[in-house]
Amino acid sequence: MYLLGGFILKKNIIITAIVFLIAASIFYVYQGSKSPSNYVKSDLAKAEEIIKAKENVAVFYTQKKCDWCKKTDGVLQPLLIENKDIKLYVVDVSIKKNRAAWKSEKLDGTPTIIRYENGIEAERILGFYDKEKYLKLLSKVEK
């Protein structure tokens, strides 16, 4: 009888541990994916539509495995939380459907932020900089 009770106890502990790990994983993924609402992830086609439609817009060209992009992202997201009136479109050029941006936007590398006026490039930042440099460029985009 003791063996049976011990087996049931071990089974309950294992099930509880699995449920806890699943819940913790979901929480971690959810927390990691939170971005400010003005940090708009987009694909290249949608970004091109927005560039043509708006008078003044900024697009952040990034890659998932780019360390400098991650550092830039770490500066941009808090900056956008502080400045909710600024909108930044984000295109991951490591995704197959967005790779054409390398040629169409003449990207020399990532991270790159390009500000467009009336569909034409007006300003570009290539590389990692401090918050003030990004704010100077982003403060010029459409509110």
Image (cartoon, rainbow, N blue to C red):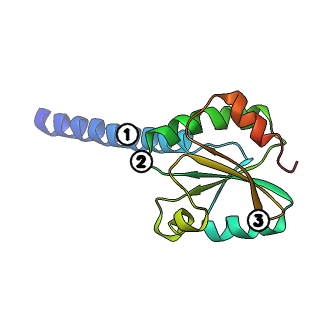
Indicate whether 134 appears above or below 37: above
Residue 27 in sight: no
Cα distance in 3D space between marks 3 and 1:
41 Å
Indicate whether 16 appears above or below 105: above
Q: Which quarter of the rendered picture does the N terminus lie within?
A: top left
Q: Whole-percent x and y of residue 76?
A: 65, 37
85 sits to left or right of 77: right
Q: Which numbered disc, 3 or 1, marks the residue closer to the eye?
A: 3
Q: Residue 65 — which label?
A: 2
Q: What residue is shown at x 48% (from left), y 45% (from top)?
A: 26
Q: Whole-percent x and y of residue 92?
A: 54, 56
Q: Nearer the viewer, residue 28 or 120?
A: 120
123 sits to left or right of 20: right
Residue 81 in sight: yes
Q: Which residue is mark 3?
A: 50
Q: Earlier in the sequence, mark 2 or mark 3?
A: 3
Q: Nearer the viewer, residue 8 or 85?
A: 85
Pointers 2 and 1 in contact (C-beta within 8 Å): no
Indicate whether 58 appears above or below 71: below
Q: What residue is shown at x 51% (from left), y 59% (from top)?
A: 93
Cα distance in 3D space between marks 2 and 3:
26 Å
Q: Whole-percent x and y of residue 61?
A: 59, 53
Q: What residue is shown at x 59% (from left), y 48% (from top)?
A: 112
Q: Which residue is mark 1?
A: 21
Q: Nearer the viewer, residue 36 or 10?
A: 36
Indicate whether 132 appears above or below 53: above
